[in-house]
Image: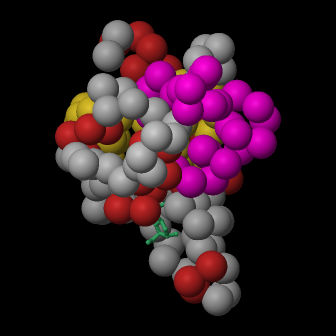
Amino acid sequence: MDGERGRALVEAAREGIARAYAPYSEYRVGAALLTADDSIVTGVNVENASYGLSVCAERTAVFAARARGLVDPRSSPLRAIAIHSPGPAMPWPCGACRQVLREFAGPSVPVLIDGSEGTVEMTLGELLPRAFHLEGR
Ligand code: THU
């Protein structure tokens, strides 16, 4: 994607890290979404003492964007996605997050994954081929 926009989106994901809540794994993740109206919506991972209730950064970002009325699969899909972690492992999005992102973004949408190996750009379709969709919806 366009270099300047990509850098701004990665920067937003990096800034979000301060708000991550990851006292259990100590693996902090920030996500930033570029919406159809050019807004940037961020999300962070939010963990819980009951570990399985923890939610990834990508999903908190998607849910925040939807709650703010900024995304719709048909009229206002996402335009780009950035994910950052300062941790030792690259923040490849988990399978559940790939499917949730795909609900609101097409297969050609760029995903910038930023971490210990630098910034890697892939499309959502490359990350999640043959995503699940209900026929006719
Ligand atoms: N995590 C994310 O935020 N995004 C992902 O795609 C994978 C994992 C978070 C969840 C948990 O808080 C921590 O990373 C360790 O699994």
Q: Position of residue 3 (x, y in %)?
A: 34, 12
Compared to residue 24, the image places residue 16 above or below, namely above
Give percent across and percent down for residue 32.
54, 36
Asked whether the viewer can see residue 85, the reply is no
What is the quadrant of the N terminus in the image? top left
**Residue 36 location, quadrant:** top right
Q: Which residues are magenta?
A: 58-81
Left or right: where 113 falls relative to 50: left
Asked whether 117 falls inside the magenta stretch, the response is: no
Along the viewing direction, whichever of 118 and 102 lies nearer the viewer: 102
Residue 130 or residue 111, whichever sits in front: 130
Q: What's the residue at 68%, 37% (across, down)?
A: 65
Residue situated in front as seen by the camera: 105 or 9: 105
Q: Is residue 50 left or right of residue 7?
A: right
Does residue 104 appear anywhere in the picture?
yes
The answer to which image quadrant residue 96 occupies is bottom left
Q: Furthest residue to the bottom?
A: 50
Which x, y percent locates residue 113?
A: 33, 41
Quadrant of the rendered image containing residue 120: top left
Q: How is the image coloured?
A: secondary structure
Q: Is residue 99 above or below residue 110?
A: below
| Residue positioned 61% across, 21% down in the render | 75
Please give the name of the residue rendered at 63% of the width and 31% of the height, measured from the top-left corner. 72
69 drawn magenta: yes
Q: Is residue 62 above or below residue 38?
A: below
Q: Decide if residue 26 is on the left or right side of residue 126.
A: right
Q: Is residue 94 above or below residue 106?
A: below
Q: Position of residue 135 (x, y in %)?
A: 42, 46
Horizontally, residue 113 falls left or right of residue 136, namely left
Q: How many marks?
A: 0
